[in-house]
Image: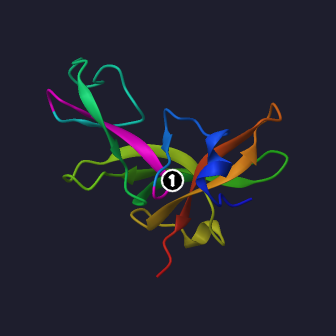
Amino acid sequence: MAVADDQQLSAVLDEALIAVGDRPALRGWRCASCGRLAFGIKRICPTCGANEGRETRLEGVGALETWTKVFGQSAYVIGYGLVGDGEDDQRVRVFGPVEADGEGDLVPGLPVEIRFRVGTTVWGDERVHHFFAPEAR
């Protein structure tokens, strides 16, 4: 199911990773000491150990870095995308499912949109999840 509005998101999102405002976005964090960008909200910088920083929102488009096909009850593609916040050229690696017409359509550096949907976890809870989709051209 596609995510439609902020009310639908409020009860089912991981607030450490997803921010809601004018649009859903992945949350990032910038260190006040070294300026390093990180994915998710942090208490300490993973690079320099400083404990001061600020929240930032990651952009809605990234670049596919790598992926693999997973086989189980059903086959799906999962990958890493490189995403920035637009403040400089830093990118963070974000892991998530990739929705494409076929694995043959994927290439390293492919522009991908970060989208959100409500899905059911293995425990039966509804949660908002991000996923990558090749950018509409």
Range covered by the magenta-colored residues: 22-34
As for residue 27 lying within the magenta part, the answer is: yes
Residue 69 in sight: no
Q: Which of 52 and 69 lies nearest the eye of the viewer?
A: 52
Please state if 80 lies on the left or on the right of 88 as rendered: right
Pinpoint residue 13: horizontal percent, then vertical percent.
Answer: 61, 40
Could you say which is closer to the camera, residue 23 or residue 87?
A: 23
Furthest toward the left, the residue is 33
Residue under numbered circle 1 = 24
Q: Is residue 12 visible?
A: yes
Disc 1, SS:
loop
Q: Residue sitting at 48 percent across and 72 percent down? A: 135
Residue pictured at 53% horizontal, 35% vertical: 15
Question: Going 68% across and 50% down the picture, which residue do you hit?
Answer: 8
Would residue 53 appear left or right of 23 to someone viewing this image? left
* Magenta stretch encompasses residue 88: no
**Image point (63%, 47%), residue name:** 9
Quarter that holds the N terminus: bottom right
Specify the amino acid type for callout 1.
Pro
